[in-house]
Image (cartoon, grey):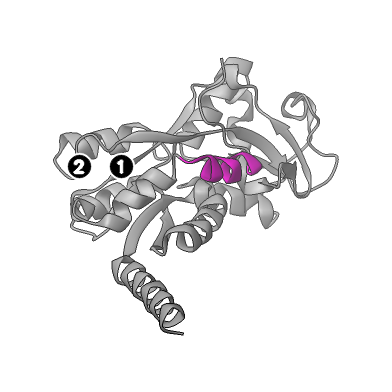
Amino acid sequence: MVKKLSRLLVTLAAFAAGQACAADVSVAVAANFAAPMQRIAAAFAQDTGHQAVLSFGSTGKFYTQIRNGAPFQVLLAADKDTPARLEQEGLAVSGTRFTYAVGRLVLWSKQPGLVDDKGEVLRHGTFERIAMADPKLAPYGAAAAQTLDKLGLRQSLQPRLVQGESIGQAYQFVATGNAALGFVALSQVMADARITRGSAWVVPAHLHEPIRQDAVVLTTGKDSPAAAALAVYLKSDKAHGIMRAFGYERQAPP
């Protein structure tokens, strides 16, 4: 009986110690990564006891907020340049920056059959509006502009283009029917490795520069065990399995 009681006390002490070490980490997450990050955060909490408190938005806006003192501890950007800039400016912890995912661009419509599997709708479609994110503000917008340039269609489609300030807003234009189709992040329309609704053309990777998405621990999180644990967790096979289900890749395709 004494031995059983001793084992129970040891178990309870270990559990209490684990709970005492658990902490929250404030994470700024690029809008395109919202769905997979919610799943990753749930798994992270279950596996580590730490809680990731998530905020979603455009990388450009997060950059401004961080420069103005926003208390985020980790940034998951939609590009590779913003984390590098924050590191250069002393607002991120040197040596913590890494590529957590490579995004894919997709031309999508909520209407089944509108977008064909080769993107020919761009040349021959009779749609009134096509949405994309602002190329100056959003990496996915820049990729969309590069795609249209490579296809020689940007000038002819210009009168029909509507731009959102983020990929999230571009998606909303299409999802609400304000645009018949648009360039969005594959993760916004894919779950469990399939397009969830409508019709889509996954843009071939050679039509735009790789959409490398970097993460970095910010200076406000330099002493946070939860921030360090999240950075490690994002590199795990479990996290990358979740990312793949939403169309992300671990490295840029050749």
49 falls in the magenta region: no
Query: In the image, which residues are magenta?
Result: 236-246
Q: Residue at x 79, y 28 (%)?
A: 117
Q: Residue at x 14, y 41 (%)?
A: 90
241 falls in the magenta region: yes
- Mark 2 residue element: loop
Q: Is residue 253 visible?
A: yes
Is residue 96 shown left or right of residue 7? left
Q: Nearer the viewer, residue 202 or 37?
A: 37
What amino acid is at disc 2?
Val
Quarter residue 126 falls in: top right
Looking at the rendered image, the quarter that the C terminus falls into is top right
What amino acid is at disc 1?
Val
Q: Residue furthest left?
A: 90
**In the rendering, at what x and y percent does residue 138 appear?**
44, 39
The relative height of residue 131 versus residue 14 in the rendered view (above or below) is above
Crowd rating for badge 1 (residues with CA inside 10 Å; few <14, some 14–19, many 20+): many
Q: Residue at x 74, y 44 (%)?
A: 195
